[in-house]
Amino acid sequence: MKHIFGPVPSRRFGRSLGIDLFPEKKQCTFNCIYCEVGNGKPVKDLVNFDYQLVIEELKRWLTENQTNPPDFITFAGSGEPTLYIQLGQLIEKIKEITDIPVVVLTNGSLFFLKEVRRNCKRCDYLVPSLDAGCKETFLKINRPHREFADYERYVQGLIEMRNEFKGHYLLEVLLVEGINTDEKEFYLLKEKIDMIKPDRVQINTVFRPPAEGFAHSVDEKTILKFKEIIGEKAEPVKYYSKKGKRIATLKGTLLEDVVLKIVGIRPCTLKELSLSLSIEEKTLEKAIEKLKEKDKIELLNFKEETHIKKKS
Ligand code: SF4
């Protein structure tokens, strides 16, 4: 499949079936230092294409896995989904074929555009991010395209989207040690979060190999300190632990393709892959060995764990 991947182990959304609108190449308005997809030049232009293939693939996946549906369908993957002009119509189509809640993970940089806010309105969970309390940190951590470097406009877009959106609005803040972790930054972030008024604030950190080696995760103490400042809406993102049912159809090169697709979007540990795909680690090890022989993946040690990542 070109656009559908997973289900991936999501810390926030359990077994999450992913839709990648830009499978060929990362397309994002930001180039965050912590990006799991890797380094890439930020883009500014909206994108359009026929979504029929996305719908066909999704229908096929849901039919083949009727007894084992995912918890969520999530727009994620190699870029910023709100760059896609027909995102609203595509979500409408998905709603016609399934009741599974739809999530849009976004950096929120395009919310200042009315048509982008309109596109996002049909999803059930909207998860924009805000990692900085001021422009200086914003430029340092998110490294936006210069067209989207206006921090005030960015925050205003997040506020406007909040006011117009009727579903669950979860703001994600990702903490990177020494970049957005001093107390002053925490209070500036709180000020902006109070203006945005999300339903919840999800506190995250660097759990997977980042685009830049200097993007380090924070310790629990820092997360708890930030949580205390933000108040009752704040919740640290926990490790994925839900185990799904076994997907019987996956074996041989088909399994290799699925693994490759997942680790191409997000580096995963063997355990995460096993939990998400409900396939024994032993079976997965064979597929990983094959992919290594074919020079398609690499193994990276990060935070005392081995992550499997697609070679670029
Ligand atoms: S982390 Fe998300 S917002 Fe940041 S560059 Fe990567 S895809 Fe874009």
Image (tube, grey):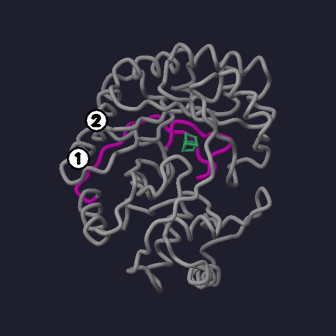
Q: Residue furthest left?
A: 96
Q: Are marks 2 and 1 in contact (CB under 8 Å)?
A: yes
Residue 122, label in figure:
2
Q: Relative to residue 160, is residue 168 depicted above or below?
A: below
* Quadrant of res 19: bottom left
- Residue positioned 73% across, 65% down in the render: 300
Identify which residue, 188 or 245, lies in the foreground: 245
Q: Quadrant of ligand 1?
A: top right
Quarter of the image for the N terminus: give it: bottom left
Q: Secondary structure at mark 1?
A: helix
- Residue positioned 64% across, 84% down in the render: 293
Q: Which residue is mark 1?
A: 95
Q: Residues within 10 Å of mark 1 (few under 14, many from 20)?
A: some
Q: How many marks?
A: 2
- Residue positioned 26% across, 52% down in the render: 51
- Position of residue 311 measured from the top left corner of the image (x, y, whole percent): 62, 67
Distance from mark 2 CB to nearest ligand 1 atom below 8 Å = no
Q: CA distance from mark 2 to mark 1?
A: 9 Å
- Position of residue 240 measured from the top left corner of the image (x, y, whole percent): 58, 55
Identify which residue, 245 or 162, lies in the foreground: 245
Amino acid type of disc 1? Answer: Lys
Magenta-highlighted residues: 28-53
Q: Relative to residue 146, is residue 263 depicted above or below?
A: below
* Majority SS type along the magenta span: loop
* Residue 292 left/right relative to 114: right
* Quadrant of res 62: bottom left
Magenta stretch contains residue 206: no
